[in-house]
Amino acid sequence: MAFTTRSQPARDAILAAARQQFTNDGYERTTIRSVAAAAGVDPSMVMRYYQSKESLLGAAVDIDLHLPDLTGVSVAEVAAILARHFVDRWEGDLADEAIMVLLRSAVTNAAAAERMRAVFGQQVVGLVRALTNDAADSDVRAGMISSQLLGLALTRYILRLPPVVALDADTLIAALTPVLSHLLTQPIGPSPR
């Protein structure tokens, strides 16, 4: 569907309202009518641009993780760069509410969970495959890295677990770096006896 530049402010207002409501109320309690009211538009306009609540969620959480180019970076430095990148992605210069909307919604909504799997599956798996020269266990490593990153985001930004929230960014990065390093470079699974 082609959109005019006149429609851009309305679409921006709808997406801003949707992100806010998905963040505060979750997917299940957010409605097309409530988003329209918050955006100051008629519900039919939301439906015209996005067709369904599921499509609206998809547009509201169109996420690019902005993964860094790690070409030429030594293996020893990769984990620290990734740890800093993700903390910055959540609370620094790259921060936006889309990833938090998706994280909060993915806990209770199958479509949001699928979107989260797609974002991390495509972007993180691709990065890990490149870093490990497409090793046979690249997907497992990427899944474990994603579990650490998403678990940290869930406990720090959604559940707001006090000891995790209390950590300053540098301490958080220092704690996350060796975990990512292990998942990128060490054997996955039990050690041989």
Image: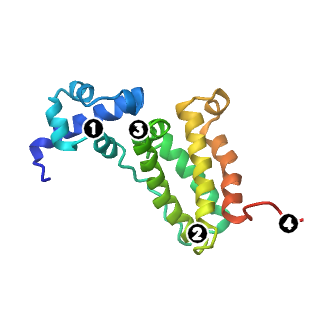
Considering the numbered disc 4 on the image, is that residue within a helix, a strand or a loop?
loop
Q: Earlier in the sequence, mark 4 or mark 2?
A: 2
Applied colour scheme: rainbow
| Position of residue 161 in the picture relative to residue 63 (left or right) | right
Which circle, 3 or 4, is nearer the viewer?
4
The quarter of the picture where the C terminus appears is bottom right
Task: Quickly name the residue at label 3.
Answer: 97
| Position of residue 5 in the picture relative to residue 70 (left or right) | left
Give the residue type that dot 2 points to: Leu
Tell me what residue is drawn at x 33 percent, y 41 percent: 57
Task: Quickly name the residue at label 1.
Answer: 15
Tell me what residue is drawn at x 66 percent, y 55 percent: 180
Residue 161 in which image quadrant: top right
**Depth order, front residue of 157/69:** 157
Give the residue type that dot 4 points to: Pro
Task: Quickly name the residue at label 2.
Answer: 131
Task: Quickly name the residue at label 4.
Answer: 192
